[in-house]
Image (cartoon, rainbow, N blue to C red):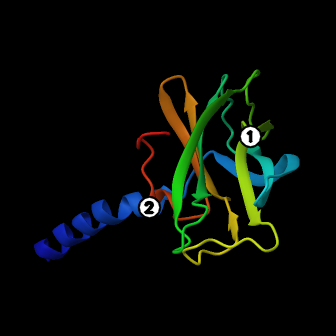
Amino acid sequence: MKRFGWFAVVMWVIGAPALFAGLSDFDFTSEAKVQDRSVSNKSDRQIRDERWAYNVVVWNKSAKDYGKLEFRYIIFRKQAMAGSKSGGYKRVRSTGSVKASLELKSHDKFTFTTDAVDLKKSQLQGGWTYANGAPPRTYDGLEGIWIRVFDGDKQVGEFVSPQGLDQKERWDAPTE
């Protein structure tokens, strides 16, 4: 009987973080929106420049009032390598932060827009091809956003979209 007691304690200690990992004082929604578009023509290609940002809504779903919170974020995007036969791309990170101007009271919401990031779409003009046979079109793309909420120096919340992005990336990796 004594062994079973220790086993239960060990299982509780191992399983407890998983049980509480989903608990948070905050609910988030994020939506990527184009802010600006322009098209330019070069001699061999057409380039569409777009500026994208995330609109984020944060709800304080707890009974606790928070002071002026800081929302630190990383936007992940892939930058296409024009002329790459393998369709290769480089992963780029853009960081930023937003401070709430007022307290976030119990069951209130706070809305903010991230800094915009640049995305390019490129297409070769008619009759042009890459000598190596690379595709004539390349697209940069958004991969997701990771937000951490701070009350002073203490982290009090976190949001990752899409789910699992935090398993592929590190928060403290270098930013380009």
Q: Residue at x 42, y 50 (%)?
A: 170
Q: How many marks?
A: 2
Give the percent coordinates (x, y) of residue 21: 48, 57
Q: Can residue 68 be seen in this view?
A: yes
Give the percent coordinates (x, y) of residue 123: 76, 65
Residue 17 tag number: none
Q: In which quarter of the image is residue 12?
A: bottom left
Chain-order first, disc 1 or disc 2: 1
- Determine crowd level at label 2: few under 14, some 14-19, many 20+ residues with C-alpha closer than 10 A: few
Q: Nearer the viewer, residue 3 or 160?
A: 160
Residue 116 tag number: 1
Q: Which of 10 and 164 is in front in this view?
A: 164
Left or right of 123 on screen, residue 97 = left
Compared with 18, 70 (above or below) is above
**Quarter in which the N terminus is drawn:** bottom left
For marks 1 and 2, give the one nearer the viewer: 1
Q: How far apart are marks 1 and 2 (CA)?
A: 24 Å
Mark 1 touches mark 2? (CB < 8 Å): no
For label 2, the SS is helix
Compared with 7, 170 (above or below) is above
Residue type, mark 2 in image? Gln
Residue ID for mark 2: 167
Q: Residue at x 41, y 44 (%)?
A: 173
Q: Residue at x 72, y 54 (%)?
A: 120
Left or right of 117 on screen, residue 156 = left
Give the percent coordinates (x, y) of residue 171: 45, 45
Compared with 166, 68 (above or below) is above
Residue type, mark 1 in image? Ala
Give the percent coordinates (x, y) of residue 67: 66, 23
For label 1, the SS is loop
